[in-house]
């Protein structure tokens, strides 16, 4: 059994439902195949989510907890990259079973010795470069490019508000080019599993969510509302092109790693940790050595523990638990203009299990819709009202700041699969790798936590 996986980073089931009559392929998924929801991990960030998808494991067993994590034994932040991944991926497992893979632009997927080909995705230093070399040469000769641009350049993302039209022009160009190259390789190369991830949906929705979500407090319908809808129509047509390019005995699955919710205000978590007396400053900056707790900007809280951090202040055991309880209790009482921004505060062991639990954040702050953690972890100037909020965040839509997975569900669709009985489909991302292995009749590794979902091949996608 051969499988094609089309990933659309951040594609929202809410928007697909909203525009379903303009999306004939997705309408067919709903009426004839399966249309369900993926449940992202915590946090629902691109590197954490796609790694969970690829490994069939929770972050406690694959080691990726955020874009930015505390480097073990230091106060330094380390950025997640494929090199920091501590588990085998679906693609490696398939190769070990003599299956060929074609992998294009999957986030957190670096260079691996593969039977087939790969172009590493987001967060890889070799992002967009095809391996092996003969595939790179084929792409150069056919398309006159040395690599694919799977994502927007940093400078373009930094200028969205100044030049939104250029942003849409570039994201559409990148998407069209990647679709063309991916379809070419789909048709010309030999593979058992083919997977590609398009990043445009995520990038667009971060900046333009308030133009399409009527629950957003700053909702405004304008030309950008139409441009977002047009991109979903493009996504629908790309999906149709892939379906039409493979035989009917090939399973095609469309999946997103998470969805979106409104972002209206950003909370500077470290200011509230300072109010509790846990964050200390020096010359206006956070003093990491003298602070008992600190956040790096994603709803994460890291304690300064004796024997773990270089200048630890909190004793493991009873004092550690007392400080975690104090943080949770006091933060949950926080009100900003009469509103409580926090939905819940979870201990790491309440979310994660596994051998890398000890390098996870000590606490995760879960935000209500409309709120998220301020990306810059530095504190604001103290004030009597204790309002440490940025009212004009760079983004109007989010998912990783940190939000409850049920508030940012992704989507999963297929015309080639069916359930034994009709019911709502909600699949944790960690269940997708074992599901794919099961469909391909490949043994599921014993250390893979996910469970194969009971989906069956449909012989006739037209019915």
Image (spheres, helix red, strand yellow):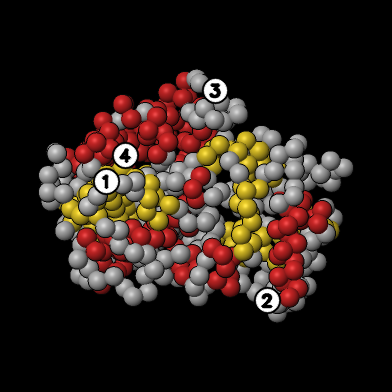
Q: Residue at x 37, y 74 (%)?
A: 447
Nearer the observer: mark 4 or 1; the answer is 1
Q: In this view, does 170 lie above or below 280?
A: above
Nearer the observer: mark 3 or 1; the answer is 1
The answer to whether residue 454 is left or right of residue 156 is left
Q: Would residue 187 be seen by someone viewing this image from the given angle?
A: no
Q: How many residues crowd mark 4 within 10 Å: few (<14), some (14–19), many (20+)?
A: some
Q: In this view, does 5 lie above or below 305?
A: above
Residue 403 drawn at (x, y percent): 56, 48
What residue sits right under mark 4 in the picture? 177
Q: Residues at badges 3 and 1 in contact (C-beta under 8 Å)?
A: no
Q: Residue 183: which quarter of the image?
A: top left
Of residue 173 and residue 99, the one placed in the foreground of this image is 99
Q: Distance between the residues labelled 3 and 4?
A: 31 Å
**Label 4 SS:** helix
Q: In this view, does 352 lie above or below 421?
A: below
**Label 3 SS:** loop
What residue sits right under mark 2 in the picture? 308
From this viewpoint, which residue is outermost toward the top? Answer: 222
What residue sits right under mark 3 in the picture? 220
Nearer the observer: mark 1 or 2; the answer is 1
Q: Which residue is drawn at 56% across and 65% down?
A: 350
Q: Distance between the residues labelled 4 and 2?
A: 48 Å
The mark nearer the N terminus, 4 or 1, is 4
Q: Which residue is drawn at 45% across and 43% down?
A: 259
Q: How many residues crowd mark 2 within 10 Å: few (<14), some (14–19), many (20+)?
A: some
Of residue 347 and residue 50, the one placed in the foreground of this image is 347
Q: Distance between the residues labelled 1 and 2?
A: 50 Å
Nearer the observer: mark 3 or 4; the answer is 3
The mark nearer the N terminus, 1 or 2, is 2
**Residue 422: assigned label:** 1
């Amino acid at each position: 059994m051969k499988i094609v996986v089309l990933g659309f980073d951040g594609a929202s089931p809410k928007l697909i439902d909203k525009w379903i009559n303009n999306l004939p392929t997705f309408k067919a998924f709903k009426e004839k195949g399966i249309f369900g929801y993926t449940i992202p991990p915590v946090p629902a960030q691109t590197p954490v989510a796609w790694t969970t998808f690829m490994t069939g494991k929770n972050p406690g067993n694959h080691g990726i907890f955020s874009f930015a994590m505390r480097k073990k034994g230091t106060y330094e932040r380390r950025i997640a990259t494929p090199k920091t991944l501590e588990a085998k991926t679906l693609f490696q497992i398939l190769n070990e079973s003599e299956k060929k893979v074609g992998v294009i632009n999957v986030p957190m997927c670096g260079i691996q010795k593969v039977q087939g080909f790969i172009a590493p995705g987001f967060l890889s230093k070799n992002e967009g470069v095809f391996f092996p070399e003969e595939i790179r040469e084929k792409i150069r000769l056919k398309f006159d490019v040395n690599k694919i641009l799977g994502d927007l350049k940093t400078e373009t993302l930094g200028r969205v508000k100044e030049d939104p039209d250029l942003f849409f022009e570039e994201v559409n160009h990148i998407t069209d080019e990647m679709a063309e190259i991916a379809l070419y390789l789909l048709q010309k190369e030999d593979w058992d599993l083919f997977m590609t991830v398009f990043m445009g949906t995520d990038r667009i929705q971060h900046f333009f969510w308030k133009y399409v979500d009527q629950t957003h407090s700053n909702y405004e319908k304008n030309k950008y509302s139409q441009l977002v809808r047009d991109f979903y129509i493009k996504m629908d047509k790309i999906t149709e092109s892939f379906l039409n390019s493979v035989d009917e005995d090939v399973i095609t699955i469309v999946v997103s790693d998470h969805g979106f919710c409104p972002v209206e205000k950003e909370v500077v978590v470290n200011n509230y940790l300072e109010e509790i007396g846990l964050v200390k400053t020096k010359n206006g900056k956070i003093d990491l050595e003298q602070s008992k707790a600190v956040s790096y900007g994603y709803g994460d809280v890291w304690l300064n523990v004796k024997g773990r951090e270089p200048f630890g202040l909190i004793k493991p055991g009873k004092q550690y638990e007392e400080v975690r309880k104090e943080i949770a209790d006091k933060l949950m009482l926080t009100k900003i203009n009469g509103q409580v921004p926090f939905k819940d505060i979870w201990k790491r062991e309440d979310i994660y299990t596994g051998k890398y639990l000890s390098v996870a954040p000590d606490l995760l702050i879960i935000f209500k819709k409309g709120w998220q953690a301020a990306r810059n972890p530095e504190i604001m100037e103290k004030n009597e009202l204790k309002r440490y909020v940025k009212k004009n965040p760079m983004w109007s839509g989010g998912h990783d700041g940190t939000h409850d997975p049920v508030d940012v569900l992704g989507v999963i669709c297929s015309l080639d699969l069916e359930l034994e009985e009709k019911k709502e489909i909600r699949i944790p991302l960690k269940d997708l790798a074992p599901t794919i292995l099961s469909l391909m009749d490949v043994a599921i590794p014993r250390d893979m936590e996910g469970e194969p979902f009971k989906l069956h091949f449909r012989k006739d996608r037209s019915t």
